[in-house]
Image: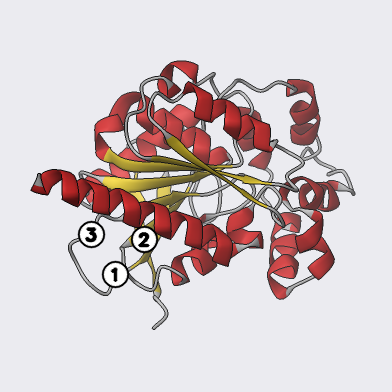
Amino acid sequence: MPSVRKTHVFDAADGCSLSASLWEASASGKLPVVMLHSLFFDGTMFEETVQRFAGSHLCIAPDHRGQGASSMGQNAPTMAQLATDIILLLDQLALPHVHLVGSSMGGYVALEIMREHANRVASLTLSCCTGQSEANPERFAALADSFSEPRHPDLPANLVAIMFGRSFVNNQSATFDYWQRKFKQLPNHTEEVVRRVFEHADFRSVLTQINCPTLLIAGAEDRAKRPEDLLWIQKQIPVSADYAVIDDAGHTPAVETPQHYAGLINNFIHRAETATTQHHCV
């Protein structure tokens, strides 16, 4: 039976109103899965992914400040601030431990959480991101500039080219049409969000301290981050990290190939939970 999405709204200390999508589990006893969305999207990008979990876990997908239904607040939307917002959400929901999934920008937020709160992460999934500081900042400064008024007329098409692979674009599905329309409606403050994303830190020191089960997912058609970027991350992590490439996905496999994306994460989390149970039984 499909999971029904509910909305949880909470306030940060700086006046930011934050919104999160919640999909309830059909049974209790398993750790929740927290999914952190990509730039230019919101938590609903995981809707189809969550449905393929068949209600096995409570799933939570917050809208980062300045995106989706969340306001900007007084504090700048740095990756560290977004991580602080997520910890506030977990505290409000009384969730001491979670499985953490980060897509692109959400991956940077996940790594910021690992920097200060690694003890709260039972497993980590990163997709379509890098662990290094931005290699081409001038490219993304130009992208941020294109949000200035009057907006560049090619902006929606440029976002499609960045976020999606050719297979998804050529398919011209209803999901593609939906997000293409959303790209045209992004608010003016998206410019600041973009600049903060591409100012993200180098995460090498964080990666070398990761000791939880980790899954890395790349899109073979990704034009924003290469599969090699995930392989680089894999080499930095001291524990054995799983790595997978989705052939017909670009930069946003949660939207483009949700069945494949969900299958990889679901199987990974099941293995991580099974290994933990067996360890506790020894």
Amino acid type at circle 3 is Lys
Q: Quadrant of residue 91?
A: top left
Q: Quadrant of residue 136?
A: top right
Labels 1 and 2: the sequence-earlier one: 1
Q: Quadrant of the C terminus?
A: top left
- Circle 1/circle 3 CB separation < 8 Å: yes
| In the image: residue 151, left or right of residue 76 | right
Image disc number at residue 59:
2
Instruction: State the residue position of label 1.
Output: 25
Q: Position of residue 22 (x, y in %)?
A: 37, 63
Q: Which residue extends farthest top?
A: 205
- Relative depth, front residue between 144 and 157: 157
Q: Disc 1, disc 2: CB below 8 Å?
A: yes
Q: Is residue 27 left or right of residue 249?
A: left
Q: Is residue 5 above or below residue 269?
A: below
Badge 1 amino acid: Ala
